[in-house]
Amino acid sequence: MNLKRDSLWAKYSRPETSVAASLPAKELYEMCQLSSASPLVDADGRLKDLFARDSSVVVNWASVFFSMKQDPLYSHSMTFAPENRSLTVYLFRYIADDLFFMFEVENGHMKASKILNRVVFSRNNERISKATRVFVNWLLHWIWHNI
């Protein structure tokens, strides 16, 4: 048990926190660092090619994240820039399984994508698989409609 992580998780899991005028980037990034993380590309290998800088499919990640914010499944979201880092972090709460999707984007390119959890993930975790399937289906649907 990690009390700091759990208190930050409880604080930022509430939907009203995403509408705050200025979210404390340091706290949000600390929550991400203290959480158990599983790379999305490990859960679904197709994402590795899509997230690659030299991918044949060009994705406007800002548009993807804007659309995710409109979807009730991912509407609780937060965006921040960690101190001393030249990237933007997008957090989306996946309420169905009390998880966060974390995307780090730099200059329009995906740097990292993870699923965050308060507790340590076990291998072959069904929650990771389910959340990843839902996200991949959502993303494929978005790409199909935005070609």
Image (cartoon, rainbow, N blue to C red):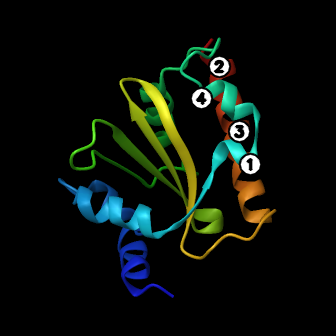
Q: Earlier in the sequence, mark 4 or mark 1?
A: 1
Residue 110 screen position, x and y as percent: 49, 31
Q: Which of the 4 image quadrants contains residue 46?
A: top right
Instruction: Indicate whether 40 appears above or below 1.
Output: above
According to the picture, the residue beneath numbered tag 2 turns out to be 145
Task: State how far apart marks 2 and 1 are (Cα).
Answer: 24 Å
Residue 24 screen position, x and y as percent: 22, 60
User: Callout 1, which amino acid?
Assistant: Ala
Q: Earlier in the sequence, mark 3 or mark 4?
A: 4
Task: State how far apart marks 3 and 4 are (Cα).
Answer: 12 Å
Instruction: Indicate which label's residue lies in the foreground, 2 or 1.
Output: 1
Q: Are marks 3 and 4 in contact (CB under 8 Å)?
A: no
Residue 78 appears in the rendering: yes
Residue 71 appears in the rendering: no
Give me the disc on residue 51: 4
Give me the disc on residue 43: 1
* SS state under label 4: helix
Q: Residue at x 51, y 41 (%)?
A: 112
Q: Earlier in the sequence, mark 3 or mark 1?
A: 1
Instruction: Indicate whether 57 appears above or below 21.
Output: above
User: Callout 4, which amino acid?
Assistant: Phe
Residue 115 screen position, x and y as percent: 59, 55
Crowd class of label 1 (few under 14; some 14 to 19; many from 20; radius 10 Å): many
Numbered disc total: 4
Judge left or right: residue 115 versus residue 17. Answer: right
